Amino acid sequence: MVRSIMLVGVGGQGTLLASRILGNVLQSRFDVKISEVHGMSQRGGSVVTYIRYGDKVFSPVIEKGQADMIISFELLEAARWMSYLKAGGELITNTQRISPMPVITGAAKYPDGIEDKIRAAGIKLTAVDALSAAEKAGSAKAVNVVLMGVMSKLHDGFDKELWEKAVEACVPAKVLDINRRAFELGREMV
């Protein structure tokens, strides 16, 4: 059986580092394929990473209605990509709001009630303030590792030590202590 996870966010949030951490963990037990779609990441646009894993995976591409899980680094991105979840799928999201260009220019308004709309669609939602946890750990840039901590606690099929080794292997040494704290704070949030 092949399972599919999407990581979605805005350029600069560290979705690609998170995908490396998650891929590192999954590769300990499965065949893993990862595909990164950068979009307008340099201008704060959407960044999406597809991760598929199982006994044998032939393609990393995830179509609408096929994702078992979405991990969203920003609330509007959670709403934007939720149609990719299969029935019974799960969404983990950071509650942070990053205004897209139409909101910044005044051409649109950031939508209200996103979490309620996701729940109303029958999606299992875990919403956490990963930004506050990252700042508490020492850097707002550690939102990605906070979310990996949340996922590791909700889906404990892999030993905590394996996750910790993945963080150590993927995170630059100069910010490793901050990211270790971020990971632990993420685990404590759920």
Image: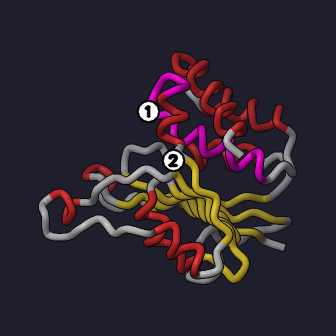
Task: Decide: is 77 above or below 18.
Answer: below
Residue at image coords 49%, 72%: 81
Question: Which range of residues does the magenta coloring cover?
Answer: 136-154
In the picture of the structure, the residue carrying the numbered disc 1 is 140
Residue at image coords 56%, 22%: 178
Instruction: Return the x and y of residue 54 as percentages of the image width and height.
Output: 81, 65
Task: Decide: is 96 above or below 139.
Answer: below
Q: Quadrant of the N terminus?
A: bottom right
Residue at image coords 77%, 52%: 154
Of residue 157 and residue 168, the one placed in the foreground of this image is: 157
Badge 2 marks a residue whose secondary structure is: helix
Instruction: Return the x and y of residue 38 as percentages of the image width and height.
Output: 40, 58
**108 drawn magenta:** no
**150 drawn magenta:** yes
Instruction: Return the x and y of residue 75 as percentages of the image width and height.
Output: 45, 60
Position of 129 with respect to 122 (left or right) is left
Q: How is the image coloured?
A: secondary structure
Position of 109 with respect to 189 (left or right) is left
- The amino acid beneath tag 2 is Leu
- The amino acid beneath tag 1 is Ala
Residue at image coords 59%, 38%: 145
* Main secondary structure found in the magenta portion: helix
Which of the 4 image quadrants contains residue 104?
A: bottom left
Marker disc for residue 16: 2
Badge 1 marks a residue whose secondary structure is: helix
